[in-house]
Image: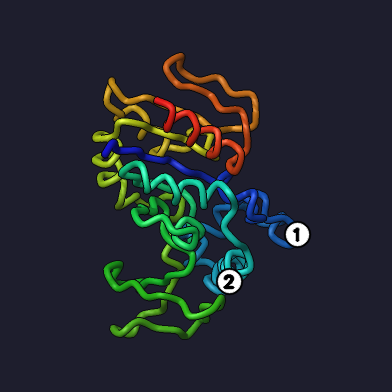
């Protein structure tokens, strides 16, 4: 079975009503993103950071996978599919995909502030100040913040390096280090980019100028006709 690796970003979940990080709007427009997603921001006002991620978590719980998510899950019938996502939601999982690596963490999980190996599922949408790990430290969102390393990057590189097909959906691949992943695809790998906008890419990348839902269906038709 041929291997197909998907690199997904915020545009993948946009059709499910989940806004991008910088598109949260409302109250959050008056804050710098580094105040809401950095170790420095956490140290300065951890309650504000908790509130921000609680709101995001609530949005994720109220959202549902879109046709793009379901389409990728269906491709597992024909390919060995692995998804490397920059998204912190769990919509790929809820749609039925079985191999997902989250580069930037997971919104529905928390972790210890002193022992990053202690990770817990969050029941519901709210993580409170005073919620502590088994070692007694405050729990924080299980998210990779600005200025922090990306622990799963090495594993992502290994996944991309073995693929026969590489599909990029919903990300401009402008944010590093995630943007460097496409460079690790084998020379023989066929590459696709699903994006509704005007994009300029390398000549060996085939563009499907559609949103995630429609684009994944077109991708499926192309792949199964090969």
Residue located at (48% from left, 80% from top): 123
Q: The N terminus appears in which quarter of the rendering?
A: top left
Q: Dot 2: within a 10 Å radius of its alpha carbon, few (fewer than 14), some, or many (20 or more) residues?
A: many
Q: How many marks?
A: 2
Q: Residue 82: horizontal and vertical position, in percent?
A: 34, 46
Between 42 and 193, the one nearer to me in the picture: 193
Residue located at (55% from left, 53% from top): 34
Residue located at (51% from left, 47% from top): 71
Disc on the earlier residue, 2 or 1: 1
Q: Dot 1: within a 10 Å radius of its alpha carbon, few (fewer than 14), some, or many (20 or more) residues?
A: few
Q: Which residue is mark 2?
A: 54
Q: Which residue is mark 1?
A: 26
Q: Residue 27: horizontal and vertical position, in percent?
A: 73, 62
Between 214 and 144, the one nearer to me in the picture: 214
SS at circle 2: helix
Residue 58 picture quarter? bottom right
Is residue 77 rendered to the left or right of residue 58?
left
Tell me how far mark 2 sits from mark 1, CA to CA. 15 Å
């Amino acid at each position: 079975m041929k291997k197909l690796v998907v690199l997904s970003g915020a545009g993948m979940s946009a059709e499910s009503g989940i806004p991008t990080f910088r598109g949260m709007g409302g109250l959050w427009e008056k804050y710098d993103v580094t105040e809401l997603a950095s170790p420095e921001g956490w140290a300065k006002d951890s309650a504000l950071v908790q509130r921000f991620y609680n709101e995001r978590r609530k949005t994720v719980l109220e959202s549902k996978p879109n046709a793009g998510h379901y389409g990728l899950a269906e491709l597992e019938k024909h390919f060995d599919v692995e998804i490397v996502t920059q998204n912190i939601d769990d919509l790929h999982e809820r749609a039925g995909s079985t191999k997902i690596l989250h580069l930037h963490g997971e919104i529905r999980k928390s972790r210890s502030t002193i022992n990053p190996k202690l990770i817990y599922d969050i029941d519901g949408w709210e993580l409170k100040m005073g919620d502590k790990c088994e070692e007694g430290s405050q729990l924080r969102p299980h998210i990779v913040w600005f200025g922090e390393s990306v622990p799963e990057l090495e594993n992502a590189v290994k996944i991309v390096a073995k693929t026969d097909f590489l599909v990029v959906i919903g990300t401009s691949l402008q944010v590093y280090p995630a943007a460097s992943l496409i460079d690790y695809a084998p020379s023989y790998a066929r590459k696709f980019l699903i994006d509704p906008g005007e994009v300029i890419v390398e000549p060996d990348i085939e563009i499907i100028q559609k949103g995630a839902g429609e684009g994944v269906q077109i991708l499926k038709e192309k792949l199964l006709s090969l």
